[in-house]
Amino acid sequence: MAVQTQELRLSTDGDGDVVDLTSELEAFVAGSGAPAGLLSAFVRGSTAAITTMEFEPGGVHDLRALLDRLIPAEGDYEHNRLNHDSNSHAHQRASIIGPAESIPIIGGTLALGTWQQVVLVDFDDRPRQRTVIVSLVG
């Protein structure tokens, strides 16, 4: 069983920026030649997350609005007090969604649903350079 790994580097705007990774992941799978296996996408850092969703303006808006209601940017956060920081909300949002997704590979393609894309969400309160580690076991 072979393991292939690649790093994707991208710039984000922060503040809930949602970046579609699907085409890069599909290209990686196609280039691997693996007919079956499992692809993992993991973002480094504690203020960003990876998930799947229908990546369209309404879905992106609704995700942002939901997280604003659940974990508002302005809040009474111990992290911000202790560290003289302003991004505790970003850490909390990222911890709820999580840093990684695993997607099966079937027939040489990602086994995603018709309206399902893999996205990175950057919750930090400033633009960032992000690294996504992509690993394929197959």
Image: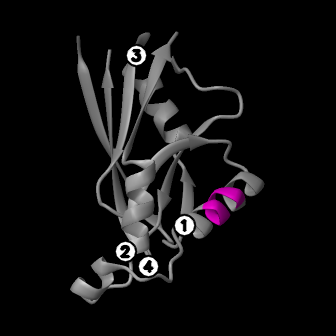
Q: Which of marks 3 and 1 is nearer the N terminus?
A: 1
Amino acid at circle 2:
Ser
Amino acid at circle 3:
Gly
Disc 1 crowd rating (10 Å Cα; few below 14, some 14-19, many 20+) is: many
29 relative to 79, above or below: above
Depth check: 23 or 85 in front? 85
Which image quarter holds the N terminus? top left
Q: Which mark is residue 28?
A: none
From the viewer's perspective, is 125 left or right of 40? right
Q: Main secondary structure of the magenta part?
A: helix
Q: Where residue 14 sits: x, y (%)? A: 48, 71
Residue at horizontal 77%, vertical 55%?
58
Residue at horizontal 23%, vertical 16%?
2
Between marks 4 and 3, how big is the CA–CA gap?
38 Å
Between marks 2 and 3, how big is the CA–CA gap?
41 Å
Residue at the spot of label 1 = 16
Amino acid at circle 1:
Gly
From the viewer's perspective, is 44 left or right of 67? left
Residue 17 colored in magenta in the image: no
Disc 4 crowd rating (10 Å Cα; few below 14, some 14-19, many 20+) is: few
Q: Which mark is residue 33?
A: 3
Disc 3 crowd rating (10 Å Cα; few below 14, some 14-19, many 20+) is: few
Amino acid at circle 4:
Arg
In front: label 3 or label 1: 1
In the image, which residues are magenta?
Answer: 62-66
Secondary structure beneath disc 4?
Answer: loop
Between marks 3 and 1, how big is the CA–CA gap?
34 Å
